[in-house]
Image: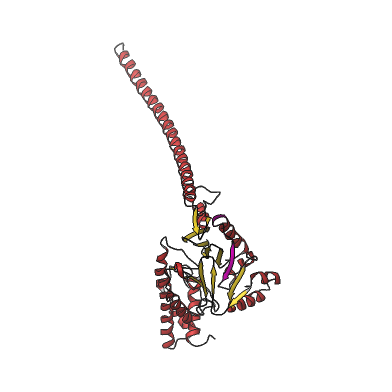
Amino acid sequence: MLRSIPVWFSLIAMKSERRGQRLAFALVLRRGRAVARRRSSERRWRLRRQCSITMADHQNRHQREMRRDAKISFGPNPVALRLCPWPRVASRPGSAVCDRAQSARHLRQIIPGHYVYSSATYNSGVIVTSDGIVVLDALNSAAVARAQREAMASTIRVPVRILVSSTFHNNYSKGNTAYADVLKIGHEFYRADLLELMRRENVPAEEQAARLPSQTFRDRVTLYLGDKEIQILHVGRAHTRGDSIIYVPQDRIAYLSELFFADQFMVINDGYGVDWLRALDAVEALGAEIFVPAHGPIPADPRETRQGLQRFRQMLVDVRDAVQAQVARGATEDQAVAAIRLPQYEHLQGYETQRETAVRRWYLQLTGKLP
């Protein structure tokens, strides 16, 4: 029995040693996890700080570039210009909300002296001269129009002299009320159709007066404002019967309003497809190099808008040809709508809501049922 005592003590010692090892390992593991959590927290803090500093540096660099390019000469009098400021958004930089808010409304220079103000998918043209600004289309509300005027006042710092209106629909005429202090010009059909629309919707007389143009024209008006010749043209029925476009010959830029939907499906509820194609042919004959759409993006190189306009014209041709084929085989209007799917355009914004309307409108015109 005495011989077994050392063995017994040895076993106890071995068990104690293993227990101590396990305790030491657990302690090391806990300490390791604590260090890892602390280091992870430090990394997150450094990343947040770096992101904040990077964003601040970006804004400061953006402001330095604005100050560097601050003076552009228009004739004998230099006019201070400030490019689109960094929008203040109550959102985390880089978030989807922040990005959407930044892109929702902004004033962008296309080429020197020419800008576009975008609100969602709507575009308003801005032509700057040494004697003032000409705006094409006031967009869809007084609030949006006031925001555009504030953007122009703070960046271009030249007064608005003239508002030209093209489409009588609400999304391009309600903003007219924010331009009570300027000369408003529109085609004679634009005025007539806008007046009919407002009466049908029981718009108050005061608002009607604020939205209607103060001067109309039939074929063309040529303005000589400051250092630019600005041609306001009616090239025929298209999106509506009273569309206007603006062409500035010296800069070879044409503002097409809703004659041009960039990378979007056509909206032709009140349109005339056959005439629309002829109108675009007249636009092509102007000799412009840049074509500003009423809807959709403008490429970084604005001369690439020519390709966008050609794609849009091809869409009109494809719809016309498809409807003509159905008419030739004796299809009814409903049969044509069911048969014509235009799958090559189903990815475009507006396809789902406008495909049927487009087919029906083209069918009516090609069968002689539109006046």
Q: Nearer the viewer, residue 293 or 320?
A: 293
Residue at image x 45%, y 68%?
Answer: 250
The residue lying furthest to the front in this view is 76
One can see residue 298 in this view: yes
Seen as rendered, the residue at the extreme top is 2
Compared to residue 200, the image places residue 60 above or below, namely: above
* Left/right of residue 168 with respect to residue 360 in the rendered view: right
**Residue 175: x percent and y percent?**
61, 66
Q: Is residue 155 magenta?
A: yes
Specify the quadrant of the image occupied by residue 210: bottom right
Q: Residue furthest left?
A: 3
Q: Nearer the viewer, residue 295 or 147?
A: 147
Q: Seen in the image, is 178 located left or right of residue 291?
A: right
State yes or no: residue 351 in magenta. Answer: no
Query: How are the residues colored?
Result: secondary structure
Figure quadrant of the C terminus:
bottom right
Number of numbered discs present? 0
Identify the residue at image location x=37%, y=20%.
16
Residue nearest the viewer, comparing 300 with 198:
300
Q: Position of residue 204 (x, y in %)?
A: 70, 71
Quarter of the N terminus within the rendering: top left
| Residue interval drawn in magenta | 154-167
Q: In this orientation, does residue 262 appear? A: no
| Residue 261 percent across, percent down from the top left | 47, 70
